[in-house]
Amino acid sequence: MLDARAPEESAASEPSAVPETGSAGREASRGQRTIYEVFRQERKGQPFQHAGSVAAPDEQFAEIYAREQYGRRQESVALWLVARDAVREIDEFPDEFDLKYRRVDGYSIKARLREARERAGTLDMAPGASDAA
Amino acid sequence: MSKRTDLLLSIADDELILGWRNSEWTGIAPFLEEDVAFSSIAQNEIGHARALYELAAAELGTTADELAFDRKPEEYRCAPLVELRRLEWARTIARHWLYEAADEIRLAALKASDDPEIAGVAAKMDREETYHRMHAEMWIDRLLATDEGHTRLDEAVDELWPYALGVLDDELRPELRARVEERLGRTLPDVEDIPRGVHEVELAELWEEMTSVRRSAPPGSQW
């Protein structure tokens, strides 16, 4: 039977930090294509995560290509397609005073936050309050 | 062989052989995304073939693999349209589109079948074929949008039209003609169909390749 090509093997699924898709190497075809970033959701309720990108002549083609690359093995329940040009990237962060100390790594604030919310009467307004804890 | 089995094998053979033909683009399609999409469509067709062979196999007391690989080329019931080796993109798209259009008409009839197994498998196939049709229609839009594309599509459709007619039974052909004529905005020539049961030499070549691994293994090998 046919050899199945895993999506992760396709060059187009390189991280978006790389400005061109892998398919550029095979770019003998004419016509303008737009790069769409693809985000996929593995299960309902989970966050969408960047899956890769597809280059397509228009949104309709992009939909088909994204379906076939990121949704044909039931690995996704939903996809988001975003034209790369529509993504606003922010990549400059001044760090003159070494702000790493502001991170809370290794310091659990969950229980203390809960106590503080109880005192303030805002426990049921907290994010995720309706979830089973 | 019952009429039911004959019908199941005709469609299964269409799907298997077209899936095989489309898979010949794997690795060499015009660009990577199309390569993945077209290969995926090819795999779907082969999946449909398997589902249909399984229904036929239950009736014949055999297996899907035996039906797919152990018959002689002349025993296949596929339409010559799917046998053609057309390694040229406009023709491939024209064949894909004509086949999907014919298949949609055929599936609509099967979905209304009194036989629940046939109606069920037709409905399942149709849910995947929806995306195949979307893919084909997008390419037709694309080809119709330029003079060069339009000319190449027209040439390919003219060449393939007698073959496309052969996919369907007589009573379903007028609908196919009406759809294709409407989409292309022109009248198609009155031609004789190239019917099922007559095989192109290309089928024997495909069969040699497709069954070579299975034939090289001792009988009863497990895969």
Image (cartoon, coloured by chain):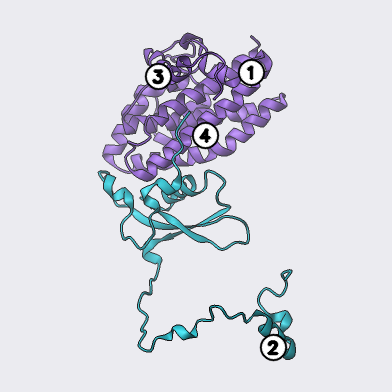
Chain colours: A cyan, B purple
Q: CA distance from mark 1 to mark 4?
A: 20 Å
Residue B186 visible to an observer of this rendering: no
Q: Nearer the viewer, mark 3 or mark 4?
A: 3
Question: Can residue A97 be seen?
Answer: yes
* Mark 3 residue type: Glu
Report which residue position mark 3 lands on. Answer: B209
| Residue mark closest to the camera, 3 vs 2 | 2
Give the residue displayed 50% in from the left and 61% down from the top.
A49
* Label 1 sits on residue: B57
Q: Which mark is residue B174?
A: none
The subunit carrying tag 4 is: B
Q: CA distance from mark 2 to mark 1?
A: 68 Å
The residue identified by callout 4 is: B44
Q: Which quadrant would the C terminus of chain B be assigned to in this image?
A: top right
Q: Is residue B131 above or below residue A37?
A: above
Marking on residue A116: 2
Residues behind callouts 3 and 1 on a single chain:
yes
Q: Secondary structure at mark 2?
A: helix
Mark 1 neighbour density, 10 Å: few (under 14) some (14–19) many (20 or more): many
Q: Position of residue B42 (x, y in %)?
A: 46, 33
Vertical order, B102 against B140 (above or below): above
Q: Are marks 4 and 2 on the same chain?
A: no
* Mark 3, secondary structure of its residue: helix
Q: Relative to B161, say whether B218 is above or below.
A: above
Amino acid, disc 4: Asn
Graded by Cα atoms within 10 Å as few (under 14), some (14 to 19) or many (20 or more), the crowding at tag 2 reads few
Image quarter of residue B107: top right
Closer to the observer: label 4 or label 2? Answer: 2
Please give the name of the residue rendered at 35% of the width and 78% of the height, measured from the top-left corner. A92
